[in-house]
Image (cartoon, rainbow, N blue to C red):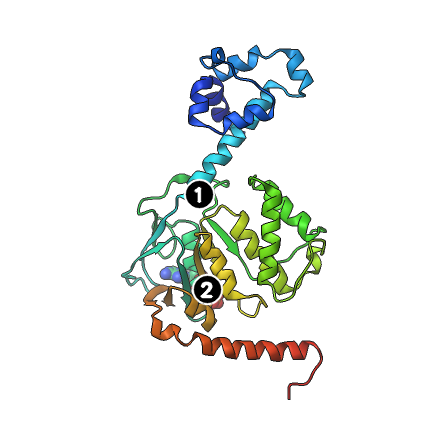
């Protein structure tokens, strides 16, 4: 708990506190604390002192934990606001592996999907890492990343509470002995979302829509298939994560509905960047960054002409899926 935040609250007049943090009214109500007109001029600490010991005992509360809980709530609400307001990121090019200028100035807006392509070792992960770290010419690439067109607030780089980026990696190794419902609920509670039960329902429903095979709320997470756990992670990131940017490494062959997964993230107004060589995902994206020798060497806007290949690719993909399922079920392919 930050003591500065606590003492700021303690010194604030009740009237000021309710004006700046309207949700404090619900907070007081939930503890049965009534605010009368003559309380408005009191500081929060004076107000707390005016509560009788009997009242505190009856309601099983104490002054310190009231201040701390309100400070926690303020922190969470402020985090919500600041996470919601990332409208864009801008990447100013640095140098490639030979020290040549990257010559790029790339603007990515909320709701955009950007694919990153390039040979092994070309620097795709480095680019994702530069974004995650909000590079300020202080990484091997010397790239500069801006948020909303400006130098980023320190919180994006140095605070653990403000996570700019949610990473979805290929390996979902669950080791916990929990059911799907318990796992998602734990996430919802740790992220202090409002109405956690509704959010848990939403994550579960979406994850099942994305997964090839259905699973139940009481399925153990350790027994989910690769596709099911990936679907659960994507739904979880879309609904519960406050991070405005989602970075995904390859999701091909994960047995999930990739189009729905992307649509879901876009609908939640996230910026999505993914390293992928899956042609369907590449065509579903808005642009494609081509990486060579550590630098972005080309930006391809996905045009209608290229995108018109999608139905054909989808058909091939469905066919492959059908064969894969046949193999899975022990059938022959002829
Ligand atoms: N512009 C650069 N200047 C210096 N080093 C760089 C640059 N870009 C990338 N590198 C370094 O090159 C190495 C390979 O990069 P990276 O791991 O990002 O490649 P990749 O495309 O993700 O590879 P893979 O497809 O195999 O995962 C890393 O050590 C990375 O830090």
Q: Position of residue 181 (x, y in %)?
A: 67, 50
Looking at the image, residue 56 lies above or below residue 330: above
Name which of mark 2 and mark 1 comes first in the sequence: 1
The residue carrying pointer 1 sits among few (fewer than 14), some (14 to 19) or many (20 or more) residues within 10 Å by Cα, namely some
Secondary element under disc 2, as helix, strand or loop, is strand
Would residue 230 be seen by someone viewing this image from the given angle? no
> What residue is shown with label 1?
83
Q: Residue at x 67, y 21 (%)?
A: 60
Q: Position of residue 177 (x, y in %)?
A: 72, 51
Would residue 309 be seen by someone viewing this image from the given angle? yes
Q: Quadrant of residue 299?
A: bottom left
Q: Is residue 94 left or right of residue 196?
A: left
Is there a contact, CB below 8 Å, between mark 2 and mark 1? no
Q: Is mark 1 within 8 Å of ligand 1?
A: no
The single residue placed furthest to the bottom in the displayed view is: 334
24 or 143, which lies in front?
Answer: 24
Looking at the image, residue 183 lies above or below residue 79: below
The single residue placed furthest to the front in the displayed view is: 37
> What residue is shown with label 2?
275
Q: Residue at x 50, y 51 (%)?
A: 166
Looking at the image, residue 183 lies above or below residue 16: below
317 or 129, which lies in front?
Answer: 317
Q: Position of residue 154 (x, y in %)?
A: 40, 39
Q: Is mark 2 within 8 Å of ligand 1?
A: yes
Instruction: Classify the position of the N terminus by image quarter.
Output: top right
Closer to the eye: label 2 or 1: 1
Instruction: Classify the position of the C terminus by image quarter.
Output: bottom right
Q: Residue at x 55, y 76 (%)?
A: 318
Q: Position of residue 198 (x, y in %)?
A: 60, 45
Looking at the image, residue 124 lies above or below residue 62: below
View quadrant of ligand 1: bottom left
Q: Residue at x 46, y 23 (%)?
A: 18
């Amino acid at each position: 708990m930050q003591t500065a935040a606590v003492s700021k609250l303690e010194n604030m007049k009740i009237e000021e506190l309710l004006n700046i943090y309207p949700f404090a009214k619900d907070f007081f109500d939930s503890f049965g604390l009534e605010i009368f007109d003559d309380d408005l001029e009191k500081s929060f600490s004076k107000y707390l002192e005016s509560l009788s010991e009997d009242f505190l005992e009856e309601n099983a509360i104490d002054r310190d934990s009231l201040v701390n809980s309100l400070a926690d709530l303020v922190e969470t609400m402020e985090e919500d606001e600041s996470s919601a307001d990332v409208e864009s990121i801008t990447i100013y090019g640095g140098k490639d592996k030979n020290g040549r200028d990257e010559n790029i100035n790339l603007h990515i807006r909320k709701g955009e999907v950007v694919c990153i392509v390039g040979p092994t070792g070309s620097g795709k992960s480095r680019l994702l890492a530069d974004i995650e770290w909000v590079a300020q010419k202080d990484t091997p690439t010397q790239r500069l990343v801006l948020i909303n067109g400006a130098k980023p607030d320190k919180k994006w780089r140095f605070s653990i509470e403000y996570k700019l980026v949610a990473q979805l990696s290929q390996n979902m190794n669950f080791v916990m002995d929990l059911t799907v419902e318990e796992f998602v609920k734990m996430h919802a509670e740790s992220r202090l979302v409002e109405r956690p039960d509704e959010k848990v329902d939403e994550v579960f429903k979406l994850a099942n829509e994305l997964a090839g095979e259905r699973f139940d709320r009481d399925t153990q997470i350790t027994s989910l298939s690769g596709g099911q756990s990936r679907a659960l992670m994507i739904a979880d990131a879309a609904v519960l994560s406050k991070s405005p940017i989602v970075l995904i490494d390859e999701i091909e062959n994960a047995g999930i509905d990739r189009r729905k997964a992307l649509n879901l993230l876009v609908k939640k107004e996230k910026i999505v960047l993914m390293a992928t060589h899956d042609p369907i995902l590449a065509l579903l994206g808005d642009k494609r960054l081509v990486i060579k020798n550590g630098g972005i060497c080309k930006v391809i806007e996905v045009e209608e002409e290229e995108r018109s290949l999608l139905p054909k690719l989808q058909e091939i993909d469905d066919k492959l899926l059908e064969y894969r399922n046949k193999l899975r079920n022990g059938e022959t392919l002829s």
